[in-house]
Image: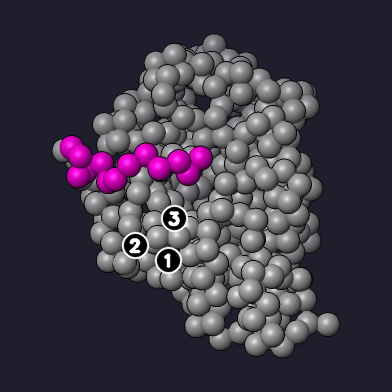
Amino acid sequence: MAMAVSEIAAHVAAGGRLSFADALEFYTSAPTELLGRLGDAARERRHPGGVVTYIIDRNVNYTNVCVARCKFCAFYRPVGSAEGYTLGFDEIFAKIEETIRLGGVQLLLQGGHNPDVPLRWYEDLFRQVKARYPEFKLHALSPPEVLHISRLSQLSVPEVIDRLIAAGLDSIPGGGAEILVDRVRKILNCYNKATADEWLDVMRQAHRAGLRTTATMMYGTAETVEERLEHLFRLRELQDETGGFTAFIAWSFQPQHTELGGIEATGIEYLRTLAISRLVLDNFDSLQASWVTQGGKVGQLSLAYGANDMGSVMIEENVVRAAGAEYCMDEFEVVRNIENAGFVPKRRNMHYDILGDPIFREREVPRMLELAVARPDGSVGETDDMRAYEARSAAAKRARSHDTAR
Ligand code: SF4
């Protein structure tokens, strides 16, 4: 049986671990202000001195072609679509160079499940990136993408991970988790891309192979409150086992232009979810504020509800924007929000090592007042270098055998 809210608060304040029943009682019944106060105290225990971190990296979506067809996704295009694209290596190198000019240290590289992009493409890309930019990091391929590559190449998940590491993979982003409960995944049509167990197992294998990863949660679709908590408890369990997660990021489903549709969860629900996540995930160091979905103002408030990190400055974004949210914050804006909330901003890498103070205070950095997109000219299709790779779909086979590629 769950304790009363006041007893739970005292238990948590003393550093006690939340049981499922108590987490449920607290998430549903505790006043928002109390949740925030305890979330904030838990943050301060782990991150004393009011340091709030952020990373300068670039979110690149190398392809929007996807066979998964998740109902909450407004980004993907089906195989053979006239609006499908796959970036060429030179386009990706140009993005890396622009990122480095802004003080950036890594790419967050994710894309659709494209049957015409084989494992060798990723290996070649990663090797070439590392040869050109040895210090630059690749935070790439969420668990469902790793599974997709494993199925496509008929290699096991550990083999795929090993090969990607050998080519230059540095860490794995926690995307594609949505809600780690199969009932919900079936409704959202993301059960086939990865079951809850499969998602967790890719992370387990990645941690075993020595990679650090993040974890995410997209709430506000078809799940119950109990299922949100089940998601958090499954993450806590795996973190107890491996200790491989660096951070957790929650965001609300962005409904515009998606098959699922509906309305977006409110800002208060976001802050309550963030705070309960901080309290349940007592073995996670870092919690990011999702200002990309919540906007700068709620993003800033997140720092009073348990978040200790502002995530990434936003140079490029394609996925959330396709679903109707478009918030641009360059380093100057991120730092202004952190300082205005009474915290000390520090630049970090994916491992949360502090790299220094804001880069714009060290040297001239161009302001980024508008988000970049996958292809600035809005063009579609794939580049000529894809001809070196085996196509699986009839459409790509046709395109690669004709002179129509870029
Ligand atoms: S969320 Fe990812 S896997 Fe699902 S349809 Fe969109 S691009 Fe494909």
Q: Quadrant of the image for the C terminus?
A: top left
Asked if disc 2 and disc 1 are in contact, CB closer than 8 Å, the reply is: yes
Residue density around tag 3, few if under 14, some if 14–19, many if 20 or more, within 10 Å: many
Q: Position of residue 306 (x, y in %)?
A: 50, 66
Please tell me which residue lies in front, 236 or 291: 236
Mark 2: secondary structure: loop
User: Between tags 2 and 3, which lies in front?
Assistant: 2
Report the amino acid beneath label 3.
Answer: Asp
Question: What's drawn in magenta, residue-wise?
Answer: 351-363
Q: Amino acid at mark 1?
A: Leu
What residue is pinned by disc 2? Answer: 343
Viewport quadrant of the N terminus: bottom right
Which is nearer the N-term, disc 3 or disc 1? 1
Q: Quadrant of residue 113?
A: top right
Residue position for label 1: 303
Is residue 28 visible in the rendered structure shown here?
no
Task: Give the structural element (helix, strand or loop) at label 3.
Answer: strand
Q: Position of residue 314 (x, y in %)?
A: 36, 47
Residue at point 27%, 36% (across, down): 102
